[in-house]
Image (spheres, rainbow, N blue to C red):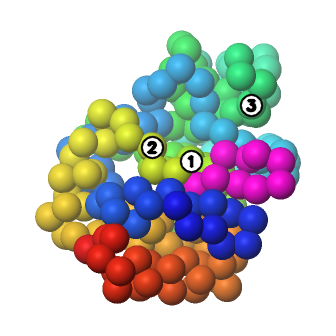
Amino acid sequence: MIQIDDVVVSLDVFREKFLCDLGACKGECCIEGDAGAPVEMDEVAKLEEVLPVIWDDLAPEAQAIIDKQGVVYTDEEGDLVTSIVNGKDCVFTCYDEKGSCFCAIEKAYRAGKVDFCKPVSCALYPIRVGDYGPYKAVNYHRWSVCKAAVLLGKKENLPVYKFLKEPLIRKFGEAWYAELEIAAEELKNRGLID
Protein backbone atom coordinates (compact mmCIF):
# COMPACT_ATOMS: atom_id res chain seq x y z
CA MET A 1 0.00 0.00 0.00
CA ILE A 2 1.01 3.58 -0.52
CA GLN A 3 -0.33 6.70 1.16
CA ILE A 4 -1.01 10.06 -0.46
CA ASP A 5 -2.23 12.66 2.00
CA ASP A 6 -4.99 10.93 4.01
CA VAL A 7 -5.66 8.29 1.32
CA VAL A 8 -4.22 4.79 1.46
CA VAL A 9 -4.08 3.11 -1.98
CA SER A 10 -3.90 -0.65 -2.47
CA LEU A 11 -1.13 -1.91 -4.76
CA ASP A 12 -3.84 -3.73 -6.75
CA VAL A 13 -4.92 -0.33 -8.10
CA PHE A 14 -1.51 -0.19 -9.81
CA ARG A 15 -1.05 -3.90 -10.60
CA GLU A 16 -4.46 -4.93 -11.93
CA LYS A 17 -5.55 -4.17 -15.49
CA PHE A 18 -9.05 -3.03 -16.42
CA LEU A 19 -10.95 -1.57 -19.37
CA CYS A 20 -14.75 -1.69 -19.50
CA ASP A 21 -16.09 -3.79 -22.37
CA LEU A 22 -19.75 -2.76 -22.58
CA GLY A 23 -20.25 -4.90 -25.67
CA ALA A 24 -19.36 -8.00 -23.65
CA CYS A 25 -20.94 -7.27 -20.26
CA LYS A 26 -23.88 -5.15 -21.45
CA GLY A 27 -23.64 -2.96 -18.33
CA GLU A 28 -24.33 -5.75 -15.89
CA CYS A 29 -22.76 -3.78 -13.00
CA CYS A 30 -25.80 -1.47 -13.02
CA ILE A 31 -28.29 -4.31 -12.71
CA GLU A 32 -26.58 -6.88 -10.48
CA GLY A 33 -25.84 -6.79 -6.80
CA ASP A 34 -27.77 -6.65 -3.55
CA ALA A 35 -27.82 -2.87 -3.08
CA GLY A 36 -27.62 0.32 -5.09
CA ALA A 37 -24.46 2.27 -5.81
CA PRO A 38 -22.93 4.18 -2.89
CA VAL A 39 -23.89 7.87 -2.92
CA GLU A 40 -22.24 10.78 -1.14
CA MET A 41 -24.54 13.12 0.77
CA ASP A 42 -23.84 16.07 -1.55
CA GLU A 43 -24.82 13.94 -4.56
CA VAL A 44 -28.43 13.42 -3.41
CA ALA A 45 -29.46 16.95 -4.41
CA LYS A 46 -27.73 16.49 -7.78
CA LEU A 47 -29.60 13.22 -8.39
CA GLU A 48 -32.89 14.95 -7.58
CA GLU A 49 -31.97 17.90 -9.80
CA VAL A 50 -31.40 15.75 -12.92
CA LEU A 51 -34.54 13.69 -12.35
CA PRO A 52 -36.90 15.81 -14.52
CA VAL A 53 -34.43 15.63 -17.43
CA ILE A 54 -34.02 11.83 -17.34
CA TRP A 55 -37.49 10.85 -16.09
CA ASP A 56 -38.80 9.63 -19.46
CA ASP A 57 -35.72 7.40 -19.92
CA LEU A 58 -36.45 5.52 -16.70
CA ALA A 59 -38.52 2.33 -16.55
CA PRO A 60 -42.04 2.69 -15.09
CA GLU A 61 -40.97 0.40 -12.20
CA ALA A 62 -38.04 2.72 -11.46
CA GLN A 63 -40.31 5.76 -11.55
CA ALA A 64 -42.65 4.07 -9.06
CA ILE A 65 -39.76 3.28 -6.68
CA ILE A 66 -38.50 6.87 -6.86
CA ASP A 67 -42.03 8.19 -6.22
CA LYS A 68 -42.31 5.89 -3.20
CA GLN A 69 -38.88 6.16 -1.52
CA GLY A 70 -36.84 8.73 -3.42
CA VAL A 71 -33.59 8.46 -5.38
CA VAL A 72 -31.61 6.93 -2.48
CA TYR A 73 -32.08 4.76 0.59
CA THR A 74 -29.96 3.51 3.48
CA ASP A 75 -28.91 -0.12 2.96
CA GLU A 76 -28.44 -2.85 5.59
CA GLU A 77 -24.88 -1.70 6.29
CA GLY A 78 -26.02 1.87 6.93
CA ASP A 79 -24.68 3.25 3.65
CA LEU A 80 -26.55 5.72 1.45
CA VAL A 81 -27.12 4.05 -1.94
CA THR A 82 -29.15 4.59 -5.12
CA SER A 83 -32.65 3.15 -5.01
CA ILE A 84 -33.08 -0.17 -6.77
CA VAL A 85 -35.84 -2.05 -8.58
CA ASN A 86 -36.68 -5.69 -7.82
CA GLY A 87 -33.84 -5.94 -5.31
CA LYS A 88 -31.07 -5.33 -7.87
CA ASP A 89 -31.49 -2.88 -10.81
CA CYS A 90 -30.40 0.71 -10.17
CA VAL A 91 -33.34 3.06 -10.76
CA PHE A 92 -31.19 5.15 -13.12
CA THR A 93 -30.61 2.38 -15.65
CA CYS A 94 -31.97 2.38 -19.16
CA TYR A 95 -31.32 0.20 -22.19
CA ASP A 96 -30.28 0.69 -25.78
CA GLU A 97 -31.56 -1.16 -28.83
CA LYS A 98 -28.91 -3.90 -28.32
CA GLY A 99 -30.11 -4.65 -24.81
CA SER A 100 -27.10 -3.02 -23.15
CA CYS A 101 -27.75 -1.29 -19.87
CA PHE A 102 -26.34 2.15 -19.21
CA CYS A 103 -26.87 5.11 -16.90
CA ALA A 104 -29.64 7.54 -17.84
CA ILE A 105 -27.80 10.29 -15.97
CA GLU A 106 -24.59 9.73 -17.92
CA LYS A 107 -26.59 9.64 -21.17
CA ALA A 108 -28.05 13.08 -20.38
CA TYR A 109 -24.61 14.35 -19.31
CA ARG A 110 -22.98 13.25 -22.57
CA ALA A 111 -25.81 14.92 -24.50
CA GLY A 112 -25.11 18.19 -22.64
CA LYS A 113 -28.50 18.20 -20.90
CA VAL A 114 -27.14 18.09 -17.31
CA ASP A 115 -23.84 18.98 -15.65
CA PHE A 116 -23.73 15.95 -13.31
CA CYS A 117 -22.35 12.74 -14.82
CA LYS A 118 -23.34 10.09 -12.22
CA PRO A 119 -22.42 9.24 -8.63
CA VAL A 120 -18.65 9.20 -8.23
CA SER A 121 -18.80 5.63 -6.86
CA CYS A 122 -20.20 4.50 -10.23
CA ALA A 123 -17.55 6.39 -12.18
CA LEU A 124 -14.80 4.94 -9.95
CA TYR A 125 -15.77 1.30 -10.35
CA PRO A 126 -13.89 -1.13 -9.97
CA ILE A 127 -12.39 1.04 -7.25
CA ARG A 128 -14.25 1.25 -3.96
CA VAL A 129 -13.36 4.01 -1.49
CA GLY A 130 -13.70 3.16 2.18
CA ASP A 131 -14.00 5.92 4.76
CA TYR A 132 -12.19 5.11 7.99
CA GLY A 133 -12.42 8.35 9.93
CA PRO A 134 -9.02 10.04 9.63
CA TYR A 135 -8.17 8.31 6.36
CA LYS A 136 -9.75 6.83 3.23
CA ALA A 137 -8.84 3.52 1.59
CA VAL A 138 -8.79 3.07 -2.18
CA ASN A 139 -9.20 -0.61 -3.06
CA TYR A 140 -9.65 -2.61 -6.23
CA HIS A 141 -12.90 -4.61 -6.17
CA ARG A 142 -13.07 -7.92 -8.01
CA TRP A 143 -16.44 -8.95 -9.42
CA SER A 144 -17.15 -11.77 -11.85
CA VAL A 145 -19.41 -9.58 -14.01
CA CYS A 146 -16.31 -7.58 -14.97
CA LYS A 147 -14.33 -10.54 -16.32
CA ALA A 148 -14.41 -9.11 -19.87
CA ALA A 149 -13.08 -5.77 -18.58
CA VAL A 150 -10.16 -7.52 -16.89
CA LEU A 151 -9.35 -9.45 -20.07
CA LEU A 152 -9.53 -6.30 -22.22
CA GLY A 153 -7.46 -4.37 -19.66
CA LYS A 154 -4.76 -7.05 -19.81
CA LYS A 155 -4.84 -7.03 -23.61
CA GLU A 156 -4.42 -3.24 -23.67
CA ASN A 157 -2.09 -3.26 -20.63
CA LEU A 158 -4.17 -0.56 -18.93
CA PRO A 159 -3.75 -0.35 -15.13
CA VAL A 160 -6.84 0.44 -13.06
CA TYR A 161 -5.49 3.83 -11.94
CA LYS A 162 -4.97 4.95 -15.55
CA PHE A 163 -8.39 3.66 -16.65
CA LEU A 164 -9.97 5.68 -13.84
CA LYS A 165 -7.89 8.86 -14.18
CA GLU A 166 -10.86 11.24 -14.65
CA PRO A 167 -13.01 9.91 -11.78
CA LEU A 168 -9.97 9.74 -9.46
CA ILE A 169 -9.29 13.40 -10.24
CA ARG A 170 -12.98 14.16 -9.67
CA LYS A 171 -12.82 12.49 -6.25
CA PHE A 172 -9.38 13.52 -4.98
CA GLY A 173 -8.16 16.36 -7.23
CA GLU A 174 -5.46 16.84 -9.88
CA ALA A 175 -2.60 17.35 -7.43
CA TRP A 176 -3.47 14.09 -5.68
CA TYR A 177 -3.58 12.22 -9.00
CA ALA A 178 -0.20 13.66 -9.97
CA GLU A 179 1.19 12.23 -6.71
CA LEU A 180 -0.42 8.89 -7.60
CA GLU A 181 1.42 8.88 -10.94
CA ILE A 182 4.71 9.65 -9.18
CA ALA A 183 4.05 6.76 -6.79
CA ALA A 184 3.36 4.47 -9.77
CA GLU A 185 6.72 5.41 -11.32
CA GLU A 186 8.49 4.71 -8.03
CA LEU A 187 6.75 1.32 -7.77
CA LYS A 188 7.83 0.50 -11.35
CA ASN A 189 11.42 1.55 -10.64
CA ARG A 190 11.45 -0.73 -7.57
CA GLY A 191 10.06 -3.63 -9.65
CA LEU A 192 6.84 -3.87 -7.63
CA ILE A 193 4.57 -3.32 -10.65
CA ASP A 194 5.05 -3.63 -14.43
* Residue 3 x, y percent position in the rendering: 63, 68
Name the N-terminal-most of marks 1 and 2.
1
- Who's the residue at 47% across and 36% down the image? 30
Magenta span: 130-138
Identify the secondary structure beneath mark 2.
loop
Distance (Cα) linking label 2 and label 3 = 17 Å
The disc placed on residue 79 is 3
Task: Residue at the far front: name it.
Answer: 190
Pointer 1 and pointer 2: residues touching (CB < 8 Å)? Answer: yes
- Who's the residue at 56% across and 47% down the image? 128
Can see residue 117? Answer: no
Mark 2 = which residue?
A: 141
- Who's the residue at 34% across and 85% down the image? 189
Q: Please, is residue 155 above or below residue 46 in the view?
A: below
* Residue 179 x, y percent position in the rendering: 59, 83
Name the N-terminal-most of marks 2 and 3.
3
